[in-house]
Image (cartoon, grey):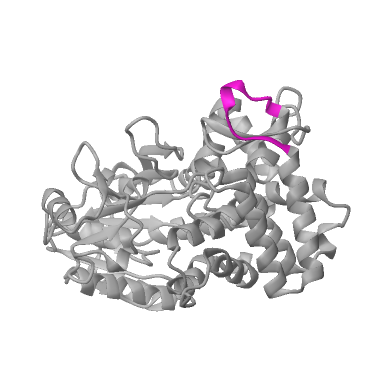
Amino acid sequence: MAQSKFRTSRQVALDVLNTFQVGRHDAGKILHSIIHQTDRKAQATDLVFGVIRNRPAIDMVIAKMTDAPLKRIHKKLLNILRIGVYELVFAPETAGYAIVNEAVNLAGAVIDKKQAGFVNAVLRNTSRSIADRTISLADADTLKTLPQSPKTGCRFNIEILPDPKTNPADYLSKAFSLPKWLIDDWLSDFGFERARQICFASNRSPSIFLRPNTLKISAKALAEKFTADRIEFEIDPTETTLKLKSHTSVTELPGFDEGLFTVQDPTSAKAVEIFAPKPGWTIIDICAAPGGKTVQMAQLMDNIGRIIATDIDHERLKKVDQNCKRLGITIVQVVPYDRLARVVSENGCDVVLLDVPCSNTGVLARRPEVRLRIKQRVVDSIAQTQLELLQKAAEMINVGSKICYSTCSILKRENSEVIKQFLLNNPAFKLESESLTLPCTAIDTSFDHDGGYIAILVKSELEQRF
């Protein structure tokens, strides 16, 4: 019998988990570089991001199933256990015996037979401790059930979670693998039920959304092209966005090389939609990389006008230029960050788009590593940087011009509180509008989406008289 040229999805996933670094957000990049080695790409992707997204809860289960402290378990062995426990708890469609056998075989091949026996013991103990791998949350014992989705969970025959009635923050933190300080913030701002829904949305497998390049094609025509090529998708009621259902790499989709579409979450698109750039405008995009909002603005402007795009990260800034060339956009001038002030002084502008670096608390589903590294004290430092960038933007515009401040955070400290402080420091500005979008799971026929914040600030003519 001929040996398959492909590696298993678990082997590929293990390589990624053994290699990625939490602080570098590089799991996706590593996975992309080796995913061709398996013919089970969707499963490999699910294993990698499923383990990262649920790692604290998975480690909690492992700790209950073995006497060995997790810090004493070899990294490769621990990641094999994490993959196995993830599948047992969060992938109920895969047979339990197959999960255990594959993990044991993987341990034997990667480490040795002795450690394979340890893996076998831990996973079989885990399997025996599970009463029902998928159960309706409406019928579940909350203390014994790890949520899988807004509707289902995995029920153990032992208590594994705190009581949400007496310790809601600790319960949500452990059930959804999120930092307790972050849960405390959400409970304070939104209450238990909304915080719980945010947790579900933060742990969802996020959809990939495609926005047609309207300079070349309409959403309807792009949909027809995908249908002809048997690419599965859904189209939103406004017929402006397509949600990809096929497990095809975006770069391999028909029309990618021709620049017929870009990838952008609906929440990310809202900022540009709110200030609605017009043909002929001059716009400064300060934190432009990788260019999703930049090209969206150019399309709404019919590729007429001028967009000056920059970013402090020189390597990521190159992607803006690459995206513009692929899409056929010619009005974007990419400039190094240290040359921005000179270029702006020569041109002026109608709007400054300031899509600032942030904690990413609105996009935890899309950036699962963040939950493993973000610290409460770091948010205060980020907020100070955001305020400084906002002040820099304020110095670039004239009376009547606007600043669009946006984040992919849902924390007040990075959003409304930054804006309040800015307005206190800059009485020449007024707040025209602000909008907070919470991350959401797909409900019924609606699309899931990320979270984020948008504020539109206008330089007031009245203040200039004093």
Residue 52 screen position, x and y as percent: 60, 56
Which residue sits at x=56%, y=46%?
Answer: 91
Residue 47 screen position, x and y as percent: 55, 57
* Identity of the residue furthest to the front in this view: 1
- 190 and 100: which one is in front? 100
Which residue sits at x=53%, y=36%?
Answer: 149
Seen in the picture, residue 411 relative to 301 is either above or below; the reply is: above
Seen in the picture, residue 414 relative to 381 is either above or below; the reply is: above
- Whether residue 141 is in magenta: the answer is yes
Highlighted range, magenta: 130-142
The part of the image, by quadrant, that contains residue 89 is top right
Which residue sits at x=75%, y=59%?
Answer: 119
Residue 340 in sight = yes
Residue 380 in sight = no
- Whether residue 363 is in magenta: the answer is no
Seen in the picture, residue 18 relative to 124 is either above or below; the reply is: below
* 366 relative to 18 in the view: left or right: left
- 283 and 34: which one is in front? 34
- 327 and 285: which one is in front? 327
Residue 125 screen position, x and y as percent: 78, 47
Which residue sits at x=43%, y=48%?
Answer: 206
